[in-house]
Image (tube, helix red, strand yellow):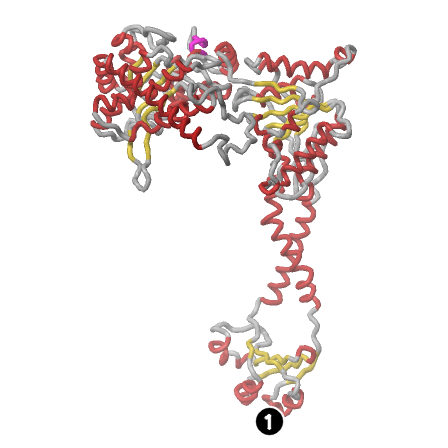
C-alpha cells in the first residue's frame, strides 16, 4: 500500500545535516578541488606565455652555414652547452624569406627561429666564429654560450602534470561516484565504508502513523507490540519477557511492508534507522561488511532504537553450498557480518531489526532463525473488507460524486494490492480531469481498472474482417464455457477491441478462496481452452492465436501432477521446492519413466479439459453463435448480455453486473464501461505474437 502523496518520509530536505538533525562538517574535498582549479590556472598561464609563438624549426648546421649565413640573415646563434643544442635567430628584415617555406605563412615570434643538434665531435665555437668572420662587418652575427636549466619545466612534468591528471580523474570517476553515494553520512569515496542509513528522530517529524495503514490489522498488532515495548518496557520485563530482537515483514510487492515500517518510525518515538539492502553492496571489497559494522555502531549509540532494512533479500540471499559456483564473495561477507551483528558474541541490547522482503524463500536460513528474526509477519494481499479500508484512505483527497459506493470498488478489485488500489484512484482522477468532469464517478474508476489491467485501447489497429470474426468466436467460446461450468470464474465483460498487446480480452471475477479442488482447476482449464475449441468448431481449423491459453493450461496441468499430487497414476508426490535452494533446475528428482508418466498425465488433463470445452459449446451452440455475432456487432458485451442469451448462470458463483439495466445497451455500444478484476481474473485471450524470423503479426491467442 502506498502512503498518501503528501506524507513526509524523511529528512530529504536537509542533506547537509548529520542523522538526527545536527549540522555536519564542511565537505573536505571542496578545498582540494579549489586548489586543483588554482594549479590548473597557473599551468595554463605558463603554457600560454611560454608557448604562444611558433616552436623553432629543426635544421642542420650545413643548411645554416650555406643558406642563411652567406645572405646575412642570421642575427644571433646561441650555443647551449649542457643540451648540445644551438639556436639560430633570424633578422627581422629577413624573416619574410622563411615564412612560407618553414612557418606555414605566419610570421614567427621573436625567436629562436631554428635550432640544430651539436654532435660531440663538432667544435661549435670554432665553426661559428669561422663562419662569422667570413661575412662583412655589417652582416656579422653575434655568438653566445650558456647553460640552461628548465626548473619550471621539471616541476611541471613531475608535480603539476600529475596533479592535473589526478584532478581530471577525479572529475571523470570519483566525483560522479561521490554523488551516487550521497552527500550525507557515508557519502564520498573517502567515506565509502560508512553506513548510508538515514536516521529519523523526533525532530524529523515523520507524519505517517498506523492510522494511515489501512487493512493489515494482524500485521499492525504484531508491529505495534514492538513499539509498545519500546515505550513501556516495564510492562513486559516485570513478567520476565524480553523484547523481540527482530521482525521480518514478508509479502507480495505493493502490500504495504514499507508503509508499515514508516508508520513504526512515526509512532515509536525512538531513533529509527532506515536503509535498503542494496546500500550494503558496493564494488569495493570489504565495503559491505564495513557499512554493517558502522550501522550497528551508530545504532548501539542511539539505543534503544529500530533499524529497518528494506529489500533485505539483496544482501540476505542464501549462501552458495558449492564453493566452485560462488560468484559473489563480497555479498556473502556482508551477510556474515550482518549475522554476527544481529546475534553474535557481542550484545545489541535495545537494537531491534525490522526488515522487509517479498522473497523470503531465498533468504539464508541462518538469517531467519530465532534470535535474529524472532517473528515473521506476513503481509498478504488485502481481502474485500481491507480493500474497502484502503480505498477510504486513498480517496480522502479525491473529489467524488455524491453517494459514491466504495464497497463496489472493493468487490471489483480482488487480488489488487494496496499499491494497485492507489494507482486505480490516481488513474481515475486523471481520467475524470481529462473529460473535464467536476467529480470522479463510478465509470472513471471502471475505466481506470480496465486501463491498468488490460492496457490502452487501440481502436486504430487494423484487423481484417476474417481475423475479427475469428477473435469474436474465440472470445465467445471463453465466455460460453465459463458461463456453463459451475467452478469456472463468472464473466464480467468481454471485448474484441485491441487493448495493449491483446487483440481481445475477457474479464472474470474470480472467487476469493484459499484452496482449490481438482474439479475447480479442471473447469478453469476447460474455460481457458474454450477459445481453441470455438475455432475448431466454427472454422474447422486452428490458429496460433491460442498460444497464451495453451501455455497457461500446460503449466496448470503439470502443476496438478508434479506439485499438487492430483494424478492417480503418479500419486501423492510433489516435486515442488518451497525453499528455492535445491538443484531441481539442474537435475530432475525422478526417473525417465516417471517423467514419461508425468507427461502422459498432464496431457490427459489437458485433453479432458479440451473435450469438456467442445461438449459445452456443442450443447449450447445457438447461444454461443448469438453471443459471437453480438460481439462482432457491439465489440463489447457484459454480464447482462449473457443473461439475456443464456439465462441465469446455473451454478457456482453468481456474476455481478457492472452496469445498470437502463444504461447497459448504451454502455455496450460505446464500449465505455469496464470491469475490473485482479490480474489472475483477467484473461487477455488474444495477443500479438511475433513468429521467429517474421514481422510481428496479429494473432488470435
Going 68% across and 16% down the picture, which residue do you hit?
227
In the image, taking residue 3 as reference, residue 528 lies left or right, namely: left
Asked which quadrant contains residue 165, the reply is bottom right
Going 64% across and 79% down the picture, which residue do you hit?
85
Q: Is residue 407 magenta?
A: yes
Label 1 sits on residue? 134
| Crowd rating for badge 1 (residues with CA inside 10 Å; few <14, some 14–19, many 20+) | few
In the image, taking residue 326 as reference, residue 535 lies left or right, namely: left
Q: Nearer the viewer, residue 409 or 24?
A: 409
Residue 692: where, in percent of width, then height? Answer: 33, 40
Q: Nearer the viewer, residue 250 or 422?
A: 250
Q: Nearer the viewer, residue 338 or 53?
A: 338
Q: Most extreme residue toward the front, as rendered?
A: 593
Going 50% across and 79% down the picture, which residue do you hit?
98
In what quadrant of the picture does the C terminus appear? top left
Asked which quadrant contains residue 225, the reply is top right
Going 46% across and 17% down the picture, which residue do you hit?
415
Q: Is residue 150 in view from this perspective? A: yes
611 over 147 or under it: above or below: above
What is the number of callouts on the image?
1
**In the rendered structure, which segment of residues is drawn in magenta?**
405-410
Asked which quadrant contains residue 121, the reply is bottom right
Q: Is residue 671 in view from this perspective? A: no
Q: Nearer the viewer, residue 554 or 271?
A: 554
Q: Check disc 1 and report its element: helix, strand or loop.
A: loop
Amino acid at each position: 500500500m502506498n502512503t498518501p502523496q503528501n506524507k513526509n518520509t524523511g529528512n530529504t530536505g536537509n542533506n547537509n545535516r548529520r542523522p538526527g538533525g545536527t549540522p555536519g562538517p564542511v565537505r573536505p574535498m571542496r578545498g582540494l578541488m579549489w586548489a586543483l582549479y588554482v594549479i590548473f590556472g597557473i599551468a595554463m598561464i605558463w603554457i600560454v606565455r611560454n608557448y604562444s609563438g611558433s616552436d623553432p624549426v629543426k635544421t642542420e648546421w650545413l643548411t645554416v652555414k650555406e643558406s642563411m649565413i652567406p645572405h646575412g640573415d642570421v642575427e644571433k646563434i646561441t650555443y647551449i652547452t649542457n643540451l648540445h643544442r644551438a639556436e639560430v635567430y633570424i633578422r627581422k628584415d629577413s624573416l619574410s624569406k622563411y615564412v612560407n617555406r618553414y612557418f606555414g605563412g605566419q610570421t614567427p615570434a621573436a625567436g629562436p627561429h631554428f635550432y640544430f643538434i651539436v654532435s660531440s665531435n663538432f667544435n661549435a665555437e670554432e665553426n661559428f666564429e669561422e663562419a662569422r668572420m667570413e661575412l662583412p662587418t655589417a652582416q656579422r652575427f653575434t655568438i653566445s654560450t650558456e647553460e640552461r636549466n628548465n626548473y619550471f619545466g621539471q616541476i611541471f612534468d613531475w608535480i603539476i602534470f600529475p596533479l592535473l591528471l589526478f584532478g581530471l580523474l577525479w572529475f571523470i570517476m570519483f566525483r560522479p561516484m561521490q554523488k551516487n553515494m550521497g552527500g550525507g553520512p557515508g557519502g564520498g569515496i573517502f567515506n565509502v565504508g560508512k553506513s548510508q542509513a538515514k536516521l529519523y528522530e523526533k525532530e524529523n517529524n515523520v507524519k505517517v502513523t498506523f492510522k494511515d495503514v489501512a487493512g493489515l490489522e494482524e500485521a499492525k498488532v504484531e508491529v505495534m507490540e514492538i513499539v509498545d515495548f519500546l515505550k513501556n518496557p516495564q510492562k513486559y520485563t516485570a513478567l520476565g519477557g524480553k523484547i523481540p530482537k527482530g521482525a521480518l515483514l514478508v509479502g507480495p510487492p505493493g502490500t504495504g511492508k514499507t508503509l508499515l515500517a514508516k508508520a513504526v518510525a512515526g509512532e515509536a518515538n525512538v531513533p529509527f534507522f532506515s536503509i535498503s539492502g542494496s546500500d550494503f553492496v558496493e564494488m569495493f571489497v570489504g565495503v559491505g561488511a564495513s557499512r554493517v559494522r558502522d550501522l550497528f555502531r551508530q545504532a548501539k549509540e542511539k539505543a534503544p532504537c529500530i533499524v529497518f532494512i528494506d529489500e533485505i533479500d539483496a544482501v540476505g540471499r542464501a549462501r552458495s553450498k558449492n564453493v566452485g559456483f560462488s560468484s559473489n564473495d563480497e555479498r556473502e561477507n556482508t551477510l556474515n557480518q550482518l549475522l554476527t551483528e544481529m546475534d553474535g558474541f557481542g550484545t545489541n541490547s535495545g537494537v531491534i531489526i525490522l526488515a522487509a522482503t517479498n522473497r523470503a524463500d531465498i533468504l539464508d536460513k541462518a538469517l531467519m532463525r530465532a534470535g535474529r528474526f524472532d517473528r515473521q509477519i506476513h503481509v498478504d494481499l488485502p481481502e474485500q473488507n481491507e480493500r474497502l479500508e484502503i480505498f477510504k484512505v486513498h480517496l480522502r483527497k479525491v473529489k467524488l460524486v455524491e453517494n459514491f459506493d466504495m464497497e463496489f470498488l472493493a468487490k471489483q478489485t480482488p487480488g489488487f494490492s494496496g499499491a494497485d488500489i492507489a494507482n486505480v484512484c490516481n488513474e481515475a482522477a486523471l481520467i475524470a480531469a481529462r473529460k473535464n468532469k467536476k467529480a470522479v464517478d463510478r465509470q472513471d474508476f471502471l475505466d481506470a481498472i480496465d486501463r491498468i489491467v488490460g492496457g490502452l485501447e487501440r481502436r486504430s489497429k487494423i484487423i481484417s474482417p476474417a481475423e475479427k470474426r475469428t477473435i469474436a468466436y474465440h472470445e465467445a467460446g471463453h465466455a460460453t464455457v465459463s458461463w456453463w461450468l459451475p467452478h469456472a470464474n463468472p464473466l464480467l465483460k468481454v471485448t474484441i477491441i485491441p487493448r495493449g498487446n491483446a487483440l481481445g480480452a475477457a474479464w472474470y471475477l474470480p472467487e476469493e478462496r484459499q484452496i482449490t479442488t481438482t474439479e475447480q482447476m479442471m473447469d478453469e482449464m476447460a474455460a481457458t481452452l474454450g477459445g481453441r475449441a470455438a475455432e475448431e468448431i466454427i472454422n474447422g481449423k486452428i490458429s496460433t492465436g491460442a498460444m497464451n491459453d495453451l501455455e497457461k493450461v500446460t503449466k496448470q496441468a503439470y502443476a496438478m501432477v508434479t506439485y499438487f499430487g492430483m494424478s492417480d497414476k503418479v500419486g501423492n508426490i510433489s516435486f515442488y521446492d518451497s525453499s528455492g535452494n535445491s538443484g531441481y533446475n539442474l537435475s530432475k528428482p525422478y526417473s525417465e519413466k516417471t517423467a514419461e508418466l508425468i507427461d502422459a498425465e498432464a496431457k490427459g488433463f489437458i485433453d479432458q479439459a479440451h473435450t469438456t470445452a467442445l461438449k459445452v459449446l456443442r450443447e449450447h451452440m445457438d447461444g454461443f453463435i448469438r453471443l459471437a455475432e453480438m460481439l462482432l456487432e457491439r465489440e463489447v458485451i457484459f454480464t447482462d448480455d449473457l443473461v439475456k442469451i443464456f439465462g441465469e448462470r446455473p451454478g457456482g458463483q453468481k456474476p455481478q453486473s457492472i452496469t445498470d439495466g437502463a444504461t447497459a445497451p448504451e454502455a455496450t455500444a460505446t464500449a465505455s464501461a469496464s470491469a475490473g478484476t485482479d490480474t489472475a481474473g483477467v484473461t487477455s485471450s488474444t495477443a500479438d505474437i511475433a513468429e521467429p524470423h517474421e514481422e510481428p503479426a496479429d494473432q488470435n491467442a
